[in-house]
Image (cartoon, rainbow, N blue to C red):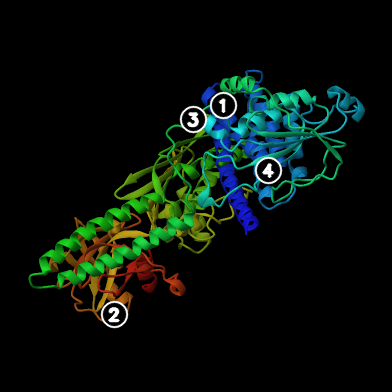
Amino acid sequence: MAEDSAILDMEKLKETFFLECAEHVATMESSILEMEENPEDEELMGELFRAAHSLKGNSGCLGYMDINGFTHVLETVLERVKDGELKWSEELTSVMLDSVDATKLLIEAAREEKDCTADVEETKQRLQDIIGKEAEGAPDGESEEVSAEKGGGGGALNILFEPDPEILKRGMDPISKIIEELWANCEVVEVIVDTSRLPVLDEMDPEICYLSWNVVVSGSVERSVVEDVFEFVMDDSKIIITELEKPAADKCDSEGGVRTLDAEKKVDEPVSRTGADGAANEGKTQVKSSKMGEATIRVDTEKVDTLVNLVGELLITQAMISQLTKEQIGEKAAPLQRAAVQLERNTIEMQERVMSIRMLPIGSIFARFRRLVRDLALAKGKKIRLEISGEETELDKTVIEKLADPLTHLLRNSVDHGVESPQERLALGKSEEGLISLNAYHEGGKVMIAVSDDGSGLNKEKIIKKAVAKGILTEGEELSDEDANVLIFAPGFSTADVISDVSGRGVGMDVVKRNIEEMGGSVGIESYDGEGTRFELRLPLTLAIIQGLTVGIGQEKFIIPITMVLESKRPTEQEIKTVEGSGEVMNFRGNYVPIIRLYKLFNISPLETNPCEAIVVAISVDGKNYGLLVDELIGEQQVVIKGLGALHGIGSIAGATILGDGRVALILDGAGIVKKEYASKR
C-alpha cells in the first residue's frame, strides 16, 4: 500500500511539473518576442532567464535529463546576454524561438516517455555555436585519459544527498542552492530523485523536504569541488560520496526512485564539517523561500466544472422554491417569501463567485499570436507589427478554449490577404510596416474582440464576381457593401488568385462564423478600400448560465437570451404592414423590421395570431433587427443552459433549461431562427 501511495504521489508530482513547464515555456516565448522589440529591457531578460532556469532545475530534480541538458545550454546563452557579453539580434530571436519549440518537444517526449534528442540536436548545436565552445564532454580529438587527467579522478562519483526534512524552514532550498550548484560545477551524468519518503497528498507539509537525490558526476571533477558544494548543509543532511569504477550509463528510472548501480563501488564515510563552521556558513547563504503576495492554489478543472454544475442545479432548485412560495397563502406566506428572496440573493451571489473561478484573462491565448504573426510575416516577406490590448479582459475558460481556431484563421487572413507587401505599401504612400491590432473589451454585457489591419481592405467587385461564378449571386444583382462583405463567410469562398500554404483554399472564414455562432456569439465586418478591414466578434461571458426572457407560445415556454432583446411591445394596426419581397413587417424605431411567427417555425398552436393582440419581441442578430411574435411575456430570470444531447444541431435552438415549475423550456438561437425562417421562404 505504501508503495502504491508513493507511485501515486510521484504521478501527481509529475503532473504538477508538466503544468509548470507549460507556464514557463509560454513565459519564455512571450518574453523572447518582446525582447526583439525591447532588447535592452533588463526586467524582460530577467523574466526569460528565470523561466529557463526553473525549467532546468525542476527537470533535473525529477530526472528528466534531456530537458535539463538542453535548457542548461539555453540558460548559458541567456546568461551571456544578461551579462552583456552577447547582444540581442533578430538572428538570436529566431534561435531562441526554435529553442522554445525544441523544449516543447522534449517536454512532450518526457510526458510520453519517449526519446526525441535527435530531433533537437541541431537547435542545441546552434546554441552551442553561439556560446563558442562545446557545452558537454571533452573537446573533439581529446582522449578519455586526457579528459580524466583534468580532474585527477579515474571513475565517476556517486552522491547520495538526503537533506534534513527541516531544511526549507531555515531558508535553504536544496534544489536551487545544492542541485543547481552541483550542475554548474560538475559534469552531471545522471540524477535520480527518491520519492519514497513522500506522504499521501493530504498529509503533505509544504515546508518539509521529503525528497532525496542520487547524483552521478563525471570523475573529471575533483572530489573537493563536490564537497564544497555541500559545505553549508553537511551537519544537517545525510551526504555519502561514493567513487565508482566507471560512470553509470543507464537512463533514469521512469518511476523516479533510487536504483542500485551495477558498477562496483567503494562506500566512503559521510563527509562532515564542524558544527561552528557549518552554522556560520549556513547563515551566509540563507535565502527567502517563499514569494510574497502569492495566494493562489491549483485546482483541477474537473472540480471547478463540477462545482459550476452544482450551482446550476442550485439555481434551478431555488427557482422551484420561489415558485412554490408565490403560491402560498395565509400567515406563513410572508416569512416564506422573505426567506425565498434571501435564498435567491445568496444563490445569485454564489453563482457569480463560482463563475468567476472559471473566468480567465483572454491574454492567455492572445500571447501565442505574436509568434504566429511574426513567423507568417517572415514567410510572406512582409513587415507586420501586432498590437495587442485588453489582455486583462476575462472570459469563461470554455469560451477561451473555443476562440483559438477562429482567431488563428482571422489573423492568418490578415497577414496573407490584408496587409500588403512593403513595396506595395510604399507605392501607396503607407509605412512599409503593416499593423494588425487585436483588442478585447466589454460592451453591453458581452465581450468584444476586434481583429483589424491597415491593409488593402476587401475588394467588393472581386467578391461579387466570385460569388456570381460560384452561383451564390445572379449576374447584375445589386448588393450593399455590408451584404457583399458577408459573402466571404460562405463555405468554400475565397478571392485569392493563388493558393498558398497560409490561406486561399476557401476553408476558414465559414468555420469562423459557425464556431462563433455555436458559442452564442456573432461576427461583424467593416472594410474600407485601401484602408483596411476590421472583424468584430461579439461573445457571451459564459456558456453555462445566462439571463433570459421567458415567453409563452401556446402551451409552450421559450427562453430568449436577454443580450439579443431590444424591446417588447404590442404593435398597433398602423405599425404592421405587408411589404412585397419582405413579407410582414413592423415599424420599429422608425424602421420596418421583419416579423417572424415562432408558432409557425415550431409548429405550435398559438393563443393569438394577430400581432396587435399578441406581443412582438424585437431582437438584434448580426447587426440587423427582427421581431419575434409570441403570445405572452412571463418574466426575466437567470437560467442554466443544458445541452440537447442527441438533438444537438437543431439550428434554431441553443439549448434547454428547467424552469421553477419543473417544466423544460427551450433556449432560442437568434441567428439560427433567422436562418431557418428565410430558408423556408426560398
Q: Residues within 10 Å of mark 2 (few under 14, many from 20)?
A: few
Kindly identify which numbered label has been placed on residue 419.
none
Where disc 4 sits, the SS reads strand
Label 2 with label 1: CB-CB less than 8 Å: no
Q: What residue is at 61 percent from the left and 31 percent from the top?
A: 176
The answer to whether residue 544 is above or below residue 122 is: below
- Does the rendering let one see residue 271? yes
Query: Which circle's residue, 3 or 1, is located before the other in the chain?
Result: 1
Q: Earlier in the sequence, mark 3 or mark 4?
A: 4
Query: Pointer 4: what residue?
Result: 193
Residue pointed to by mark 3: 430
Q: Position of residue 195 (x, y in %)?
A: 64, 47
CA separation in Å, label 1 and label 4: 31 Å
Q: CA distance from mark 3 to mark 1?
A: 33 Å
Give above or below for 102 relative to 650.
above
Q: Which residue is mark 1?
A: 45
Residue 674, position in %: x, y? 35, 65
Q: Is any part of residue 91 visible from this angle?
A: no
First in sequence: mark 3 vs mark 2? 3
Name the kind of residue labelled 3 in the image.
Answer: Lys
Q: Classify residue 623 by image quadrant.
A: bottom left
User: From the viewer's perspective, is 636 left or right of 357?
Assistant: left
Q: Residues within 10 Å of mark 4 (few under 14, many from 20)?
A: many
Q: Nearer the viewer, mark 2 or mark 4?
A: 4
